[in-house]
Image (cartoon, coloured by chain):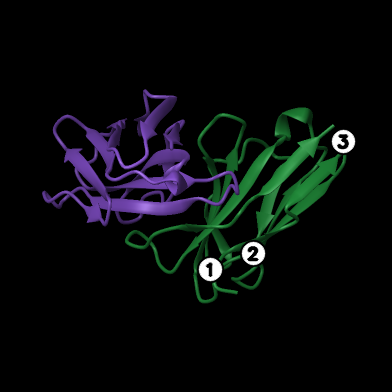
């Protein structure tokens, strides 16, 4: 596919459960970003990967949130012991290099924690 | 830390007319990038236009243009000949261009644009 894809499109879970959200970046893009968008707000940065390593994870709200990108392509955002406040749209973006290149976004995963 | 402010939660425009969306930002950096993204109900953020702070010339993309006032830290988006398909949330975003700095985008809260037929 030509764009960033995210799965699942929607995820409903119960409080306390574990969830994984997946992002497939544009082929060849080395940089990958996760953002969280709460209702009525702009996206907020969570974490940024350059290749396989997390170059900036300053936006992760607490240690229940973790993300990996083991082969430098697909990334998974993992949330443990979900809370109702984690309900949001989780957006993934990728770019071909740092600094100069535009970030291209996927359609997001809407997470609902009951 | 950088902040981005969009003071208009909602705006409306008649089809074929022109509308301007406002954005101000705060930064101590001299070089950076500014963006306008469009988010339709499908949720996918789509880049509308981008401006490098070191460029004095305002960016334009077809019906979309910006008014970049660096000293005032203002970055407004003008949409000319508005079309029904322009209806969406519009987000202003900032990114540092400092090498080794954060790659993250800092977004405003958005402006919901309605286009009336």
The local crowd at label 3, few if under 14, some if 14 to 19, many if 20 or more residues have their Cα within 10 Å, is some
Dividing the picture into quadrants, the one containing residue B47 is: bottom left
**Left or right: residue A14 compared with residue A38:** right
Q: Where B95 falls versus A93 (above or below)?
A: above
Name the colour assigned to chain B in the rendering. purple
Residue for point 58% across, 47% down: B43
* Residue at the far front in the pictured view: B117
Instruction: Please say whether residue A90 is visible from this viewpoint.
Output: yes
Which mark is drawn over residue A59? none
The local crowd at label 1, few if under 14, some if 14 to 19, many if 20 or more residues have their Cα within 10 Å, is some
**Left or right: residue B89 compared with residue A101:** right
Check chain identity for marks 1 and 3: say if they share one: yes
Mark closest to the chain's N terminus, 1 or 3? 3
Name the colour assigned to chain A in the rendering. green
Q: Position of residue A101 (x, y in %)?
A: 36, 63
Mark 3 and mark 2: span between their CA atoms?
24 Å
Q: Position of residue B19 (x, y in %)?
A: 30, 35
Secondary structure at numbered mark 1: loop
Instruction: Please say whether residue B97 is visible from this viewpoint.
Output: no
Q: Position of residue B41 (x, y in %)?
A: 58, 44
Which mark is drawn over residue A51? 1
Q: Where B19 falls versus A46 (above or below)?
A: above
Mark 1 and mark 3: span between their CA atoms?
31 Å
Which mark is drawn over residue A69? 2
Disc 2 and disc 1 in contact, CB within 8 angstroms? yes
């Amino acid at each position: 596919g030509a764009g960033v894809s995210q799965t699942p499109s929607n995820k409903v879970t119960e409080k306390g459960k574990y969830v994984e959200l997946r992002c497939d970046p544009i082929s060849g893009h080395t940089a990958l970003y996760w953002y969280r968008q709460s209702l009525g707000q702009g996206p907020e940065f969570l974490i940024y990967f350059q290749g396989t390593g997390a170059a900036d994870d300053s936006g992760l709200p607490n240690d229940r949130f973790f993300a990996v990108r083991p082969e430098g392509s697909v990334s998974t955002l993992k949330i443990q012991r979900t809370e109702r406040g984690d309900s949001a749209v989780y957006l993934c973006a990728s770019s071909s290099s740092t600094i100069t290149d535009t970030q291209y976004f996927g359609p997001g995963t809407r997470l609902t924690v009951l | 830390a950088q902040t981005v402010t969009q003071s208009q939660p909602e705006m409306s425009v008649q089809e074929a007319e022109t509308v301007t969306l406002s954005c101000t930002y705060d930064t101590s950096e001299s070089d950076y990038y500014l963006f306008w993204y469009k988010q339709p109900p499908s949720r996918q953020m789509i880049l509308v236009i981008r401006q490098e702070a070191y460029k004095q010339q305002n960016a334009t993309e077809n019906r979309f243009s910006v008014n970049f006032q660096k000293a005032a830290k203002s970055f407004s988006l003008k949409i000319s000949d508005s079309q029904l398909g322009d209806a969406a949330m519009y987000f202003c975003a900032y990114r540092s261009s400092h090498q080794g700095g954060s790659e993250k985008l800092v977004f405003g809260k958005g402006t919901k644009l309605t286009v009336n037929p």
